[in-house]
Image (cartoon, rainbow, N blue to C red):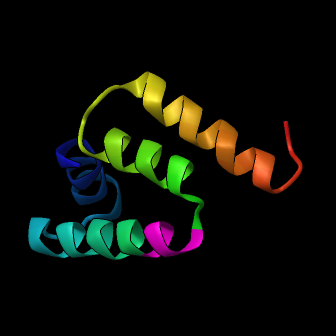
Amino acid sequence: MKELIAKLVKDVDIDEATAKKVVIVVKDFLDDKLPGPISAQVNNALDGVGSDQIDGALDGVKGLFGKK
């Protein structure tokens, strides 16, 4: 999550506290909308488990929308 917060601070030019709030809101939103296994992968990626987790989560989300 720290990496994403830092990216938001740099790219969007917002302060760190606001960036953290944004990440938490998006994380909570995705938790509510995504199936459990995909939500878990997204949470793991945000918690810094690894970039391969992000790829897996993105593939799962693409699958929900019929994309490959």
Residue extending farthest right: 66
Which x, y percent locates residue 64? Answer: 77, 54
Which of the 4 image quadrants contains residue 60? Answer: top right
Q: What stretch is highlighted in magenta?
A: 29-33
Which x, y percent locates residue 30? Answer: 49, 67
Answer yes or no: is residue 21 visible.
Answer: yes
Magenta segment's dominant SS is: helix
Q: In this view, does 2 lie to the left or right of 30?
A: left
Which x, y percent locates residue 21? Answer: 22, 75
Q: From the viewer's side, name the closer residue of 31 and 6.
A: 31
Which of the 4 image quadrants contains residue 26? Answer: bottom left
Reply above or below: 55 against 6.
above
Reply above or below: 10 against 23.
above
Reply above or below: 21 against 43.
below
Based on the picture, tell me whether residue 51 belongs to the magenta stretch: no
- Identified at 89% across, 50% down, the residue is 66
